[in-house]
Amino acid sequence: MKKALSILLVMVLIAGLSAGCQNGETSNSGETVANGNETSNEAATDEATDATAGDTEESSLTVAAIETAYGAQMWTDVAAAFEAVHPGVSVELIVDKNLEDVISPSMKAGDYPDVVHLGVGRPAALTETLIKEQALLDITDVLSMTIPGEDITVSDKLIPGFTSTRITNPYGDGQTYLAPMFYSPCGLFYNAALFEEKGWDVPTTWDEMWTLGDKAEAEGIALFTYPTTGYFDALFYGLLNVTGGPALFNAAMTYEDGIWTTDEAQKAFDIVEKLAAYTEATTPANANNENYLKNQQLILDNEALFMPNGTWVTGEMADAPRVENFEWGFTALPALDANSDQYSYTFFEQAWVPAAAKNPDLAKEFISFLYSDQAAAIFAISNAVQPIFDMTEYLSGENQLFYSVYNDGAKAAMGNFAATEPVEGVNMADTLFGTVDSLVTGDKTRDEWVASVIEASERLREALK
């Protein structure tokens, strides 16, 4: 009831803020001009003043955010909510699907946004570049900040583990440079109605997976597809935990000498090689940014059973045609055997502050606000889920299914490759994940793939920060 009331209050606030934006222009003084007449906004100003203990200094904050499947409106609403509790603060928003193309030219000229929401793993690798150049601000102190309007610190509200990864702490020094944002359990998506119709059980071990693959093949259905090879990051990270636990995963992420030749790592390569043999034949041709939806459509058309993805896929495919009675299903990666653990890699986005930001203190305040109940409820309306306690209470339907994967026994895997100095001609993501297309087509062998991964790992180990 408390959470429902919180969401209702936030929606009322959003409606009011949106109405203000539509009916007039808001000046820095807090007055609203509507139809040529000035109207007082004293009540809202008084409430905001109480929340911020009299912080009325006029200032501007530039926030740049990547527009994803969650849409842009939530950023407009969160910016308005932040302004409402920070009198005199004006948030300038830059929201774009190709954010790197928009902000990179001005950054090269020395004009940086104050806050950037842009995670690692993007093709342009802007965030990784700034990490390598040590151009991000240390925001460890944000974790001890009290969230605006609440009586709890950021660290006490965050789900444990999200600020102790190689993504948020890229230099392994215990300091946080990237704030964890919207998280999404990643795993295998499928049509639950098809499994019910066929009387098939969802595999919990890889041996069960291969048995199911043979059954499906006999009925003209491929076991596996993938949107693009980029989706093998979450799959392979989870798989390393399946075959060797966190110890193998962490060693691989730090390029430990000889790690890729261990039996545990070799098992991971073996599983991907076998998945390639069970992959729907047209997948590699469409595994690109222009046609990846065609691969996702294979699940909706019952032409393939499983695909690796994140919770955003339901939004991407919301208007796509599908077979009758289609129902999304979701499972963690199968375990090695009945006595082993299943894993679901948790993908999460990140926000950060450039070291050259003009307003670093206000930028930190904005990031702390992103974990408030108010901001979290706004994000949840767009199905963007913050990594804070009790968020599942904001969710319903499919999202409750997806975010309950860890309640059903699967373990969470988190993290990424350690930051290194730039190494010309070496890109581990291209080598480890991008090669999968060639495995499916037969253009590369498993051994060639493994050899290239080992070579890339050795060169990156020498360049570790």
Image (cartoon, grey):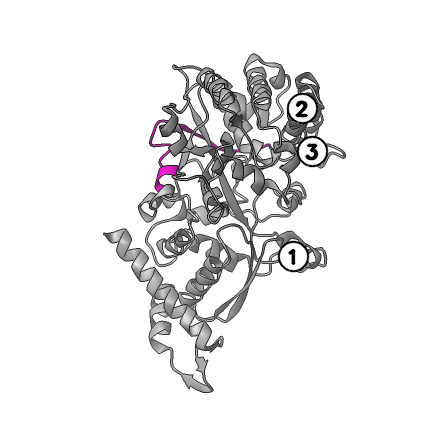
- Residue at x 57% of width, y 22% of height: 272
**Element on which disc 3 rests:** loop
- The single residue placed furthest to the left in the displayed view is 1
Q: Earlier in the sequence, mark 2 or mark 3?
A: 3
Give, as a three-letter code, the residue at label 1: Ile
Q: Is residue 87 left or right of residue 169?
A: left
Give residue 30's quadrant in the image. bottom left
- Residue at x 42% of width, y 69% of height: 18
- Residue at x 62% of width, y 45% of height: 127
Q: Which mark is residue 103?
A: 1
Is residue 414 inside the magenta stretch? yes
Q: Which residues are magenta?
A: 400-417
Q: Which mark is residue 427?
A: 3
Residue corresponding to mark 2: 453
Q: Is residue 133 above or below residue 6?
A: above
Is residue 56 inside the magenta stretch? no
